[in-house]
Amino acid sequence: MPAVFPADSVGLVSPQRLAFQQPLALACGRQLDSYELVIETYGQLNSQASNAVLICHALSGHHHAAGYHSVDERKPGWWDSCIGPGKPIDTNKFFVVSLNNLGGCNGSTGPSSLNPATGKPYGADFPVITVEDWVNSQARLADHLGIHQWAAVVGGSLGGMQALQWSISYPERLRHCVCIASAPKLSAQNIAFNEVARQAILSDPDYHEGRFQELGTIPKRGLMLARMVGHITYLSDDAMGEKFGRERKSATHNYDLHSVEFQVESYLRYQGEEFSGRFDANTYLLMTKALDYFDPAAAHEGDLARTLSVAQADFCVLSFTTDWRFSPARSQEIVNALMAAKKNVCYLDIDAPQGHDAFLLPIPRYLQAFSAYMQRIEV
Amino acid sequence: MPAVFPADSVGLVSPQRLAFQQPLALACGRQLDSYELVIETYGQLNSQASNAVLICHALSGHHHAAGYHSVDERKPGWWDSCIGPGKPIDTNKFFVVSLNNLGGCNGSTGPSSLNPATGKPYGADFPVITVEDWVNSQARLADHLGIHQWAAVVGGSLGGMQALQWSISYPERLRHCVCIASAPKLSAQNIAFNEVARQAILSDPDYHEGRFQELGTIPKRGLMLARMVGHITYLSDDAMGEKFGRERKSATHNYDLHSVEFQVESYLRYQGEEFSGRFDANTYLLMTKALDYFDPAAAHEGDLARTLSVAQADFCVLSFTTDWRFSPARSQEIVNALMAAKKNVCYLDIDAPQGHDAFLLPIPRYLQAFSAYMQRIEV
């Protein structure tokens, strides 16, 4: 419990809930007549509204990106290492906006919200949301906040896809696009891992075709498995080896089919169980579908350079050497397309052993490069 | 249906069932008072019994490694590309023995066999079997067949671990050890994937703590997920990309949470379903545990060279460039230890895009190298 928050923390923060009454048309052909978004902001919007930075979250992220909700909160927001006074996204300079995306399970309208048409939770009937839909909803959010143009849109992983989509959907509404540990589309292997996670949830008898909330159950087993699979892909083989190796739980083997023998098993079970208690199964399915569908170049016969030719932003692309979920080669596809489209792009492949998770971690070289880029942004 | 079998096929083959009455002590501290092994043999044992080759199978393998059980059989045995007249394991030269390992589900004594003590299927009460136990049971099999010394013990993946263990447990009973796409022990990531597969099975309500057979159910969902995860690790990212890319099932997206959108999803579901209909869940758990426990160097404080110093065999180690389940680096750990222990070792890292699955496939460079090694063996 930090009695006093660290000097480089944004300190105590409170989420806000914003209601949007104008219908939002979605890529799936359906629409949301109205919806709510939960957001947090850090720093002050300047008088020209030219210093706003949008944070886009990844698969299991949310609006609470920095600071603390109370003095009792044990851990700060999920990207606290990158957001705060003097940090890469410097709140002395920038007004930072972070939201829980539509379809989420941390307060914004999603599968666990009540469907006004039925008075019951949406469940699996919540419309499938795409990265483009999120960006459209975020543009409405910008309107609401009086932000015509973001100084930067920033995100890692699925968040980086949103940042990229911003530069295509609303080229004049961002000056910088920061795309970290991301990819221009999923590979077959990426989709395959998502499919395993989905099948784990869908085949859990407690999923009840997505109506588990109405029935007072939770597909915990499915969510746990989904998270365990996901977690393996977030860590590099080396990082997992460094962290756990073949370290045993006890000196001798149990020699049965169900006991935990190795530390890595214990870690994965814990991660899975913890997650299954706090995350919504339908949201998990939605997020994996949004990842699968993302493929902006499909509109131009797979030509990413042509797709990005409309962009007006400058780009910063970062990858991590041991990331095998979205490997450096995937970031380089983006960089190559941007160069072919004659855009300004900075690219750095950061030597880091932590795998995909690196984008969330306070790695000095990463923070330094990220800071250097953000410091150059004029507001 | 091959009306006539191919000229380089061993043709029609029949499994044999062998009963062993002498108790087998196991690493877990328990023993099997008696057990049966199902085997197949191809070729003729010579008068000196000096031309016998043992085939050790991998996780989901069995005794049917080559040829056909009937003229109606659609596909030959699982390693037919490597076993037959003129093939790497040339049945004109060698007498080939292939078995279903203890704990298996293809006829040898395993979890679905009746426990003589209770008259019910063993289920999860079948003792946990280690690679060492398998090798001990295979030594008994050799005794039974009158084979004092194998010309070679050969295996891929988990089968390669058995071949390696033979060279340590019974150094004088094999002249050559062929270890393909294997590893001297699992990494934390390998164990993590196994743990996901196990949790998928254990958490399936139809698993019933392993007594599903008594209760007339099958934990199909768990087995399906386990196989799906496994399958991803058998293919390289590139191979999956080549095979499926982002090819869609239909021209338009369904935009729901459960439909198959991409070919790779359809493929994985098919693989998972097909497997769940033919494989025993307790055997799957046993096989993953045997993989996890395998660590022969643990007996010598992790010093693999010291562990292998007792070996008398010559070694052939093969790996595949895109195998990320057991990467070439893992084979090179074995090779380096063998060199440090001053053993004769041939090593080839074969350039192949197929990932771990490559060891089962008729890749010309692989068959050529494998043949060249086997041809040099004196019988």
Image (cartoon, coloured by chain):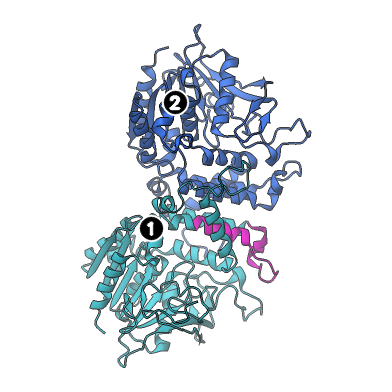
Chain colours: A blue, B cyan
Nearest to the eye among marks 1 and 2: give it.
Answer: 1
Q: Residue at x 61, y 78 (%)?
A: B115
Which image quadrant: the N terminus of chain A?
A: top right
Q: Residue at x 68, y 71 (%)?
A: B214
Position of residue A25 measured from the top left corner of the image (x, y, whole percent):
63, 28
Please say whether residue B307 is visible from this viewpoint.
no
User: Does residue A187 sit above or below A86 in this rendering?
Assistant: below
Q: Are marks 1 and 2 in contact (CB under 8 Å)?
A: no
Question: In the figure, is residue A340 to the left or right of A27?
Answer: left
Badge number at residue A82: 2
Q: Residue at x 54, y 27 (%)?
A: A135
Badge number at residue B354: 1
Q: Amino acid at mark 2?
A: Cys
Q: Name the image quarter holding residue A117.
A: top right
Q: Chain of mark 2?
A: A
- Kindly report the distance in space between the C-alpha atoms of the residues bearing marks 1 and 2: 40 Å
Q: Nearer the viewer, residue B21 or A249?
A: B21
Q: Which residues are magenta?
A: B204-230
